[in-house]
Structure formats: C-alpha cells, structure tokens
Image (cartoon, grey):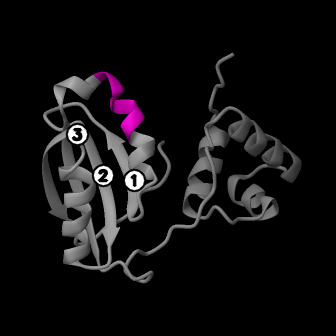
Amino acid sequence: MTFIVTDADRRILRELSQDGRLSNKELAVRVGLAPSTCHGRVRMLEDAGVIRGYRAVVDPQAAGAAISALISVAVLDHARSQVTELIPLMQAIPGVQQVFLLGGDRDVVIHVAMADVPALREFIRAHIGAHPDLGQSQTQLIFEHAVGTAPA
C-alpha cells in the first residue's frame, strides 16, 4: 500500500525538520491540527518510513572536529555490483558524517569531520587509498554547511 503525503503531513515534516524535539501539543498548534490528529499523522509518517528517525544535529567544530570535507570516490569496475554494500561499511568508520551514492564519474561522496589535516590525510590513506574496491578520489574542504528544511 502506498502512503499518500498530505498537505498537513508536509507542514508536520517542515516543522519537525526544523525542530525534532517539538512536543506533540506545540507541533499541533504550529500545523493547525488537533493534538490527537497530529499525533496520529506523525505515527503514520513514522510507520510509512517517511520519517526515518530523530537525531541531534552536532556541530563538528564544537565537538572537536576542526576540518570537514567531502571525499568523492570512484568504485573500481570489479566492485560495481557491490557498491551498496560499501555504504554501511563506510558509515561505521569514525568521523564519517554521511555517505551518498551517486551517478556520474564518482560513485560515492563521503562527508567526514576530522580533528585536523593530518587526521584527514590518514583517513584518506587508511580508508580510501588502501581499500581494494576504491579508485580515484577527490577531496574538497567544507568552509560552511547549512541544512535545509524538509522537501515541499
């Protein structure tokens, strides 16, 4: 069964994407629903997988990671069929913030936050350069990172 996202659901998603700690009562007021209706819609969004979870957004610099970077990586031809299996392995590496599977000349982008440049260099050497399934990589430093709101 396909879940249909309503206008009210979009309002809920927008508010929760800005503040996932809102009480149901406050959320209901902001989106113009009765608290019981709002609670039911949130539960349905969770059950349908539209809301995948709640987490704290941590400022890497405030947490001691002075360098953030995006590392674009090409997966070697022999490993193309297993690229989706690489993602959870990369997610488990300390310092990895996000992993994106892409189309184009690079297959994966890894968002990392490291203590300093030597730590970033070591991450690339140990986890990218030494991996038998990964080829060329390109690293771009992040100067600022702004998070958007939920999709319309």
Q: Which residue is mark 3?
A: 132
Q: Is residue 85 above or below residue 51?
A: above
Q: In which quadrant of the rendered view does residue 143 lie?
A: bottom left
The amino acid sitting under disc 3 is Pro
Can residue 142 be seen here? The reply is: no
Disc 1 vs disc 2: Cβ atoms closer than 8 Å?
Answer: yes
Q: Are marks 3 and 1 in contact (CB under 8 Å)?
A: no
Marked residue nearer the N-terminal end (3 or 1): 1
Which residue is under mark 1? 98
The amino acid marked with disc number 2 is Ile
Please tell me whether mark 3 or mark 2 is closer to you in this view. Answer: 3
Residue 152 in the image: x percent, y percent?
48, 42
Q: Quadrant of the N terminus?
A: top right
Nearer-N-terminus badge (3/2): 2
**Mark 2 falls on what kind of element?**
strand
Q: Mark 1 belongs to which amino acid? A: Gln
Image location of residue 18, percent across then percent down = 55, 62
Cα gap from disc 1 to disc 2, whole angstroms: 6 Å
Q: Secondary structure at mark 3?
A: loop
